[in-house]
Amino acid sequence: MGNAQSDLLLAIDVGTSACKIAVFTPEGQVLSSSTREYEVLYPAPGWAEQNPDIWWREICIGVRDCLEQGKLSPGRIAGIGIDGQSWSCIPVDREGNVLHNTPIWMDTRAQAICDELTQTDREALFAVSGNPFQPSYTTPKILWFQRNAPELYQKTHCFLQSNGYVAYRLTGRLSQDFCQSYGLHVFDVGAGAYSKEAAARLKIDLNRLPPLFPCHAVVGTVTEAAARQTGLLSGTPVVAGGLDAACGALGAGVLQPGQTQEQGGQAGGMSICLDKPVSHPSLILSPHVVPGHWLLQGGTVGGGASLRWLARELGETERLLAEKEGGTVFALLDRLAESISPGADGVLFLPYLSGERSPIWDPHASGVFFGLSFQTTRAHLFRALLEGAAFSLLHNLRTAEEVNVQTETLYAMGGAANSRLWTQIKADVTGKKICVPASDTATVLGAAILAGVGVGLYPGFAEAVRATVQIQREHIPNPENRAVYRALYPLYLELYERLKPTMEKAAALQNAQAGRKNRKVVL
């Protein structure tokens, strides 16, 4: 674990809108933190990319910020954990150079490839991976590079995930953690190993995938070059890390079967802890970052990004008040939405602002406000948005019940958990008690716990959770509000089903106008 002074843990979160770095004590106290924002690029309809070199640049700045803020000696860092956004596909050459921007989880450019392969291989692929074959996953993105950029594919030594890329920049070692491997349909999620049969079926070269590691395993130590860039001490251990949602589940205390993490960050979703793999064709199955456990997940786009979008477009009044009177824009918007009764007086919102992932898996789905009238105000729109995101959470929970996976208590994390109103709406919509941990840094805390277990600072995961996770507040469903939402939920489902054909036609028209079929990869 290092010398006697190595008593702290550093965690790196590679998010969609920003990276977050934090330094923790063994008790889970944050000593310093830094958030560095970056852009998502949208070069064509359905495309969503980021530059991993920019991730690394901002991470280096953020790590230095943390060390300087806390006046911390880098020698006190006992280990480094990394969590990252799902389904990256970062092509690197033998020298570790990034060959192209990575398509991220929102990217659906490989839809045609998925349509083709699911016609012939859907059942065989699902039997191995336990996951639907959808363009958001890593596998179709690899195939897209293979078919549309063959020279780049041939130059690629390895395809990395977000946390694997950062681990490589820190240590010079290639790694693929077990948790993020679910994005690869050549990974047998039950056996915890690559499947040669699945790789042959998809014509994917397993030599272009990194070696597999448990999430808490030390994959290497900080190199001299990385030490110069980050201010860390060379030789500091780095663990493989894992999926941001799974690290968030761990950081929220989700360790036992049936415990469920509710995520309200840039995206939304849920992760139900299992002691054996149980799959559903419309949900996501991944190994947990905790060995011997799995997560049945629902991932949606209707999270904090939706609220930020509406706040940007219609929240100018709250921005000015926040600047004048203090407080945050989102706290003022909460107060605005709270002035409207449950059900938003008939206004419904479909939170599909960038297509939708589970359980509908529709890249053509689009956002909708329904039920507008001359009586509709901004407050109605904000209330309907919060409720629409909660309905998407319920949709995933109900889908999990189809394979007899039940949930009782939800553990909320992400920025949305700071909103008492939004959290209460989710409790009322789902009918579940929601617990909110004391820290809103659950994701980076989970990554720090992985590092702590990996270097021996904690004897195990249960002990680490007991030492670091405390519940701050609880939300109990309101029976009256629950009755309102129970009546509205079928309308929410019906609205999408009736609009689905129209959404598909509109997307086809948009793509034709953009000349998407004629677009070439720019290398």
Image: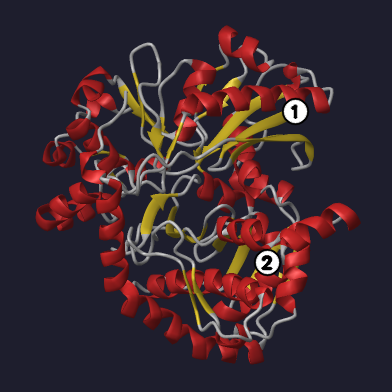
Q: Is residue 194 left or right of residue 78?
A: left
Total count of labels? 2
Question: Crowding near pointer 2: few (<14 within 10 Å), some, many (20+)?
Answer: many
Horizontal and vertical percent position of residue 385: 58, 70
The residue at the point 64 percent across, 78 percent down is 380
Q: Secondary structure at mark 1?
A: helix
Quadrant of the snapshot with the C terminus: top left
The dot on residue 435 is 2
Query: In the rendered structure, which amino acid carries the disc numbered 2?
Result: Cys
Q: Residue at x 84, y 52 (%)?
A: 323
Can residue 500 be seen here? Answer: yes
Which quadrant would residue 476 be assigned to in this image? bottom right
Q: Nearer the viewer, residue 384 or 33?
A: 384
Q: CA distance from mark 2 to mark 1?
A: 29 Å
Q: Of residues 64 and 316, which is closer to you in this image?
A: 316
- Determine which of the numbered discs, if any, sits on residue 66 in the image: 1
Q: Please, what secondary structure does the residue beneath circle 2 have? A: strand
Foreground residue, 390 or 227? 390
Residue 215, above or below 461? above
Residue 402 seen in this snapshot: no
Provide residue 314's location: percent of width, then percent of height.
65, 63
Tell me which corner region of the image, top left, top right, bottom left or bottom right, holds residue 103.
top left
